[in-house]
Amino acid sequence: MRFFYVITLMLMTFVVYSCTSFSKPLQIETVRIESIDVNKLLDIQKSKGSTFLAEWANSSINLISKNPDAPQNSRTLSYGSTSDYEYSYQSPAAFTVSGMIVSTVDNTEISWDEVHTGENPATNNLAFVTWADAFNSPFEDMVFIPGGTFTMGSKFNKDELPKHRVTISGFYMDKYEVTVAQFREFCRATRRAMPKQPNWNNDRHPVVNVSWANAAAYAKWKGKRLPTEAEWEFAARSGDRQYYYSWGNVKPVRKRGGNIADESILMEKRNWKIWKGYYDGFVYTAPVGSFYPNQFGVHDLTGNAMEWCADWYQADYYKKSPNIDPQGPAKGSHKVLRGGSWNLSPRKILTTKRYYFRQDVVINYVGFRCVKD
């Protein structure tokens, strides 16, 4: 394994244990540790569908997933960093970074996909690991979104008011937006016409120009469904973290961001409203997974393709929305979309921003992803 600027860090450690059973998410147990003067955030993914997560905040309470009956198997590994804030590392059993050891508990070999840094608290460089969860998914390219309660809505637009508490049951969500290749397979199997794709597409780009009806039909064909907008917002905001972008409440940096209206788009569209100083490297859509996932392990929830949701749109729905698993109005004339897209500026890609189109609308910046109970 190639290393860049190899450093072994063992400041303070805690161990995240993982089971290989894909039957249900691991249980969460609370532990307490001392503070750690470090400035790193870890997003760690395991090859078989399990995602380890960690977040920094000004607290010393830690939530970790573990199997208390399993034997320990912890081998410390070194790592190195590159200028792009990525890490080189070894597998399989464990590694140490910024005071954290992640390990298997049953000698199962792990293939690590990615480790990278994130933001620190804006007002304090003294960061603490506050939680780390491991969630298993039995479904290919889906991650489990644990249920929870969060504050939905914002003050930025009238149809996002009032801010209200909503409880969401756990569900599985596609890691990536549905791709051109995946949708083509569906069209061939169901003998329907493939929607015309823009010139800049390839098989790994999100499929666009898809109507709501075709998106819903694809989801049903896969044994899935479209997400409710409450589920979508809960996933995009990483639960109750009040993130306005899927990567957090900070300016995007390199892959810690998304495919949005940036400096790159000015090559094609002059005088466009953009996120000044940010280069995502794509004028139009990007291959899915080009940017780091959010803290649930989901990619491209901010930007790339705007995503259809299951709900009918109603401007004042939040005033009467149920507080447990809201499904949207019973009827309407337009469907909700979320997430912004490759051509939208910062205020238009917020995780709370609600869009709505007729079901038959097809546009070169609208796609979708699926969920499953």
Image (cartoon, grey):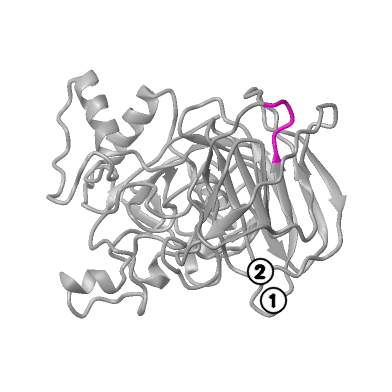
Q: Position of residue 20 (x, y in %)?
A: 65, 25
Q: What residue is shown at x 25% (from left), y 70% (from top)?
A: 264
Amino acid tagged 2: Asn
Q: Position of residue 319 (x, y in %)?
A: 58, 58
C-alpha gap between disc 1 and disc 2: 7 Å
Q: Looking at the picture, tell me which residue is in the foreground, 220 or 178.
A: 178
Q: Earlier in the sequence, mark 1 or mark 2?
A: 2
Above/below status of 178 relative to 189? below
State the mark number for residue 39.
2
Left or right: 168 with respect to 278?
right
Kindly indicate the quadrant of the structure image that contains residue 196.
Answer: top left
Q: What residue is shown at x 53% (from left), y 72% (from top)?
A: 250
Q: Looking at the picture, tell me which residue is in the foreground, 211 or 367.
A: 367
Above/below status of 368 relative to 341? above
Q: Position of residue 364 (x, y in %)?
A: 21, 52
Q: Residues within 10 Å of mark 1 (few under 14, many from 20)?
A: few
- Provide the secondary structure element on which disc 2 rests: loop
The kind of secondary structure the magenta stretch mainly shows is: loop
Amino acid tagged 1: Asn
Q: What residue is shown at x 69% (from left), y 60% (from top)?
A: 98
Q: What residue is shown at x 74% (from left), y 73% (from top)?
A: 126
- Residue 54 sits inside the magenta stretch: no
State the mark number for residue 270.
none
- Provide the secondary structure element on which disc 1 rests: loop
Kindly indicate the quadrant of the structure image that contains residue 242.
Answer: bottom right
Q: Position of residue 168 (x, y in %)?
A: 63, 43
The residue range painted magenta reads 103-107
Above/below status of 35 relative to 171? below
Q: In which quadrant will I find the C terminus?
A: top right
State the mark number for residue 125.
1
